[in-house]
Image (cartoon, grey):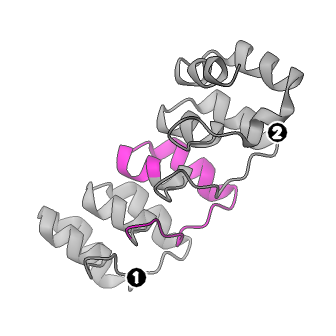
Amino acid sequence: MNEFFFNEIRNGNFDEVSAILKKNPILLDSKDQRGSTPLILSTYYDQEEITDLLLESGAKIDAKDATGNTALMGVCFKGYTDVAKKLIDKGANVNERNTMGATCLIYAATFNREEIAKMLLDKGADTTIKDVRGLSALDHAKEQGAPSLIAMLEKA
């Protein structure tokens, strides 16, 4: 059942996911073989309608996968601006860190997601946090050669 449920999330089958969740609400906090929760998976695959359903059902917004990534971290490197906004507006922790010490802002800087970086900064993302390599979001933006993102982070 779990594997089928997670596949339905990946495939964006809202009606099936909704029906399975109604029958078996405990799946809301389950994890797949990679340690991803339904919310992490739905956001990673940019499934907005399913993400809404999971959030309305009480999914833990800052739950982490096996590598310590949250749903918000995933959309910051994937570049799903609408989903990032939704998670930020619902109270996702913008300064959460994964096992490598990376934050959402570090991911946004590394992958040159300027609009997402701005949203994170507006919600209080900490520009001083460094990952395990000792690099901040600004350092990552410089590595990527992203001038407008560098300027934004230098002003923050």
Badge 1: how crowded within 10 Å, few (<14), some, or many (20+)?
A: some
Percent across and percent down for residue 124 are 54, 77
Q: Nearer the viewer, residue 53 or 154?
A: 53
* Secondary structure at numbered mark 2: loop
Say which residue appears at 73% left-offset and 13% top-offset.
15
Report, in whole angstroms, how far the alpha carbon at label 2 lies from the one at label 1.
32 Å
Say which residue appears at 56% left-offset and 29% top-offset.
47
Say whether residue 83 is magenta. yes
Q: Quadrant of residue 48?
A: top right
Q: Quadrant of residue 28?
A: top right
* Secondary structure at numbered mark 1: loop
Q: Residue furthest right?
A: 23
Percent across and percent down for residue 25 are 85, 32
Quadrant that contains the N terminus:
top right
Percent across and percent down for residue 116 are 42, 56
Say which residue appears at 34% left-offset and 81% top-offset.
130
Q: Amino acid at mark 1?
A: Ile
Q: Residue furthest front?
A: 33
Q: Amino acid at mark 2?
A: Ser
* Residue 77 horizontal side relative to residue 145, left or right: right
Instruction: Find the magenta span and give its range.
Output: 74-100
* Label number found at residue 100: none
> Mark 1 = which residue?
129
Badge 2: how crowded within 10 Å, few (<14), some, or many (20+)?
A: some
> Mark 2 = which residue?
57
Quadrant that contains the C terminus:
bottom left
Using the image, determine if residue 79 lies above or below residue 138.
above
Q: Nearer the viewer, residue 101 or 125?
A: 101
